[in-house]
Amino acid sequence: MNKSTRKLVIISMLAGMSYILMFALQIPLIPAAPFLKYDPSDVPALIGAFLLGPVAGVVIAFIKVALFFITKGTGGPVGSIQNFLASASFALVAGLVYKKMPTKIGALVSMVAGGLAMTAVMHISNATWALAAWGVPEDGRMAMLLTMILPFNLARMTVSTILTFPLYLGVMPILKRLGWSFNG
């Protein structure tokens, strides 16, 4: 199998896994905001960004969100856009940092950097348009950002990092033994 075909197959498999995880596992993390649900769908996107480069992570996030919107549609267009922004910014920044630091510590640093970038992107996105699009009154937006959305995104980053790190460390030696080299 040539390199571009292999890359396409891996992106497709990881996007499929990401979609299934998003579809099947939705866990509320913030009791006061049960509509903010964590799903582990960022894990395959992060692994894809590490293996194939940051653009692959963004593509995986896009395919996941598009499939979820078509099949389930929970959250509507606003939720889909927000989920894509979150997953894509997480995977993009993590993939960029990891490309410069392709080590175990680099993987950890990259996920923290990606998670913080995702948290910043989601803060800006919610503050500027998403909360208004969902009908949250202007006088309640700042409190919601600080007491629900910020803690949720930090928790999302933490849980995704805790799940991704050991999986990635387990997958890399196997792929190297098979002679696969990545990080496009």
Image (spheres, grey):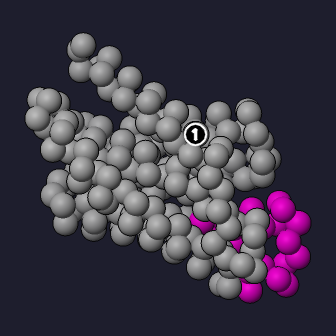
Left or right: 62 with respect to 115?
A: right
Q: Is residue 139 magenta?
A: yes
Vertical placement of residue 61 versus 89, above or below: above
Vertical placement of residue 105 versus 184, above or below: below
- Number of disc labels: 1
User: Which element carries disc 1, helix, strand or loop?
Assistant: helix
Q: Quadrant of the N terminus?
A: top left
| Main SS class of the magenta portion in the image | helix
Disc 1 residue crowd, few under 14, some 14–19, many 20+, Cα 10 Å: many
Instruction: Find residue 148 and report its horizontal and vertical position in percent.
Output: 68, 79
Residue that sits furthest to the top in the current view: 1
Q: Is residue 118 magenta?
A: no
Q: Quadrant of the C terminus?
A: top left
Q: Is residue 59 visible from the viewing direction of this image? A: no
> Dot 1 corresponds to which residue?
19
Q: Quadrant of residue 141?
A: bottom right
- Residue drawn at x 56%, y 46% is 21
Q: Which residues are magenta?
A: 122-144
- Residue drawn at x 36%, y 29% is 10
- Residue drawn at x 18%, y 39% is 174
Instruction: Find residue 55 and report its horizontal and vertical position in percent.
Output: 39, 40
Residue 42 versus residue 167: which sits nearer the camera? 167
Instruction: Find residue 37 and report its horizontal and vertical position in percent.
Output: 67, 63
